[in-house]
Amino acid sequence: MVDDGRVVNTFRALLQIDSPSGEESAMAAHLVGELADRGLEAHTDQAGNLVAHVDGSGEPLLLCAHMDTVESTAGLTVVESDGCLRSDGSTILGADDKAGIAVVLEALSRTRRTPPLDVVFTVHEEGGLLGAKSLDLAGLRARRGLVFDSGGAIGTLVTGAPSQYKLRARMHGKATHAGAAPEEGINAIVLAAQAITRMKLGRIDAETTANIGVISGGNATNIVPDLVELRGEARSHSEEKLQAQVDAMKGALEVAAAEAGGRAEVELERSYSSFALADDHPLVASFFEVARGLGLDPVTVTGGGGSDANVFNAAGLVCANMSVGMANPHAKDEYIRLDDLTKAADLLTALLERMAE
């Protein structure tokens, strides 16, 4: 069994290192030392990703977790209660994805045998999977892998995830004095509001979601604003539905602006592409066999978010995303159960030994 005290202590140490997207250097330096303690020499690529290799027998395997958090955890106070770790509510905890890193490090400490491993800790995952997109896959031996960046019961394996488009728009109106001559202006905030009311947002169907998440504009209450900027997204497991959704959002912005005499500039950017692994894929089958051997009830799920696994699958490196037990990621009430952290490390340790046979 995995030393549960050690994996928890490793995780606690990682939590004390602030590593928001784009500021992962302190975390990378710490992990170079952690890997060296396990006999591994790590190097940093041009993007800042940390890469190490382990010799072994069998088919090579990628192990990946990301070093960044969605926002700063500076000043984090960790609270332990009811068998869980959480923050005091002033910051996020950062289990996403420091729990994934801790599980990988613990498994590397405990395994007696492994397949050849490519261990990758990426940067800037939360900011658009930028580390994974910049990773030189030609430098890896593996063409299959596991990403440790998911929640749910231990034994949960994410084998499908959606594609995503990001939307950026600038709604142009006409500025004027709001008290003296409002009828001569075109209120860009109103243009944006009218466009948004025409959009179908939230849960579109079982495969598709959409959101407008950021709106900014205006300078003063006595000025009819001439510019508003919006940022949003759409995701779907269906390429046809995704394209229809982003086209509808773009159209709503352009029509609302044109009807009032304004103008809309809309940019759509493909962030990542969907993937889907069959339950009988050898990687999934091995996971199920080992999880059941540990008394777990393994399940596959289709996720609603993107991860480094999307990037790897699109490049031909088959990956699934394994739960490490994190809950409520990206929120101040994020938490993780200590026994889930231990169970995840147990599962990965057993899986690596099974794959080395």
Image: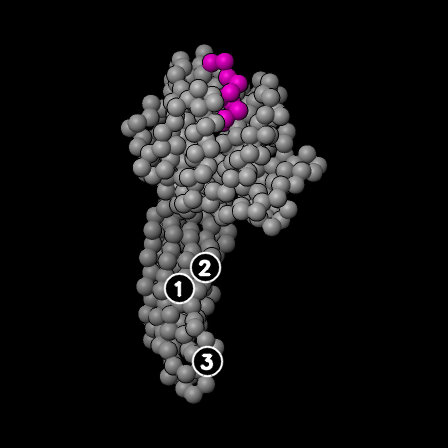
Q: Are marks 3 and 2 in contact (CB under 8 Å)?
A: no
Residue type, mark 1 in image: Glu
Query: Which label sits on residue 222?
Result: 3
Quarter of the image where one finds residue 76: top right
N-terminal label among 3 and 1: 3
Residue 281 placement (x, y as % from top left) = 43, 24
Residue 341 placement (x, y as % from top left) = 59, 30
Q: CA distance from mark 3 to mark 2?
A: 23 Å
* Residue placed under numbered mark 2 in the picture: 214
Residue 301 placement (x, y as % from top left) = 51, 35
Report the span colored magenta. 104-113
Residue 159 placement (x, y as % from top left) = 46, 32
Q: CA distance from mark 3 to mark 1?
A: 19 Å
Query: Which label sits on residue 229?
Result: 1
N-terminal label among 2 and 1: 2
Secondary element under disc 3, as helix, strand or loop, is loop
Residue positioned 36% across, 29% down in the render: 43
